[in-house]
Image (tube, helix red, strand yellow):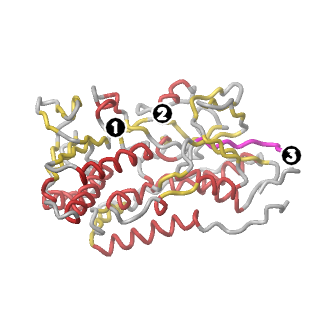
Amino acid sequence: MQTPEQPVLRDIVLIGGGHSHVGVLKRFGMKPIPGVRLTLICRDTHTPYSGMLPGYIAGHYGYDDVHIDLSRLAEFAGARFYHDEAAGLDRAARQVLCKSRPPVPYDHLSINIGSTPQVRRVPGAAEHALPVKPIHRFNERWLALLERVRSHAGATRIVIVGGGAGGVELTLAMQFRLRNELTAMGRDPDELAFDLFTADECILPTHPDKVRRAFERRLEQRGVRVHAGCPVSAVEAGTVRTVDGQSTSADEIVWVTQAGGAPWLEESGLELDEGGFIKVRDTLQTVTDPDVYAAGDIASVVNHPREKAGVFAVRQGPPLARNLRRTALGKAPKPFRPQKRWLALISTGDQYAVASRGTLGFEGAWVWRWKDWIDRRFMRKFSELPTMNKHRP
């Protein structure tokens, strides 16, 4: 950790507490660089691990099980923690503009803020739908929905918009939890109805046929109505409308699709792709500015395009930390090549999961236990921090 007597020679500023940046903080805490100061700018004091959120929704984990304490991690890394939100960049002055505090100067900058559902692309979605991100707002509404279902006598219909892994997994997790809540109260769980809408012709379009069929069967068995090839064209209070003119009533509308970059990036001067994500080189440096890095969902690796998945943000943590370290020491950063095939473990809500990798797919309760072990091991890296000598050079 940085001692008060050490002069600050270089400032590394981290925007966002995503999966890549928690890895950076951990590594700099284990091996600090004298004279290099870290600053974390993040709206949240606890950052969720996306891989465990469906399990949290389903009731298998508590809040602390699935969140990393950023305040504690920043202290471990000897980093300043500004509880705020980035609002822009002044790259000429090398400053991060914040919503509530004065600008933060940097020598090297890294952005790991995830993606933002683009609810404004569909009329009424911003006003009447619940986007999954930011997670803290979704959690507040989810807890309110839990209470509403408990106290409301009668039918409840929930609509999920988005047929990718996130939408399918969230649908099954919510259904499992809410049905259990009603059963525990002696009520009929069939009071609940779920509809899943996707613009694609099928759910899970980027996954193998075997995996897709497994989830199609599971959704059918659980009574979830799937509306494939039905792009949502408008959202009104209590109603979802599709491009073919059909309408579906809903007590809650959850938005898990059409993610993009934060609006302030459009004025940053950084080159973005068509989705609003920051274009980066193999080194994770932006194509615009070698002193600005980006990782996770917000980054678009030009030479290695991949779908947005938490596994890539986690895997980018070590090379991002290495390259920030090398840059601060005046060394050239090294390229990072993401894997072409990756493992996705998609849960079904009921402590059962399906594995998807390349063209392969397999499933079972044992897959969920494997996923649970992997996820808990990841979280222990940040909850069981070693005791470090704060006064080391």
**238 displayed left or right of 342:** left
Residue nearer the viewer, 265 or 288: 265
Magenta run includes residue 11: yes
Quarter of the image where one finds residue 214 = bottom left
Q: Quadrant of residue 190?
A: bottom left
Residue 29 in sight from this viewpoint: yes
Q: Which residues are magenta?
A: 8-15
Q: Secondary structure at mark 3?
A: loop
Residue 152 position within the rendered picture, expressed as x and y whole percent measured from the top left: 21, 49
Residue 98 on the magenta span: no
264, above or below 70, in the image: above
Q: Which mark is residue 7?
A: 3
Identify the residue at horizontal 38%, vertical 59% (top origin): 56
Secondary element at image label 1: loop
Q: CA distance from mark 3 to mark 2?
A: 34 Å
Q: Mark 1: which amino acid?
A: Gln
Which residue is depicted at the point 23% across and 31% down?
237
Taking the spot 26% from the left edge, 40% from the top edge, the residue there is 253
Counting residues from the N terminus, which is met first, the one under dot 3 or under dot 1? Answer: 3
Q: Which mark is residue 258?
A: 1
Q: Residue at x 21, y 41 (%)?
A: 251
Q: Which residue is mark 2?
A: 262
Using the numbered discs, state the Cα–Cα distance from disc 1 to disc 2 in whole angstroms. Answer: 13 Å
Residue closer to the observer: 232 or 291: 232
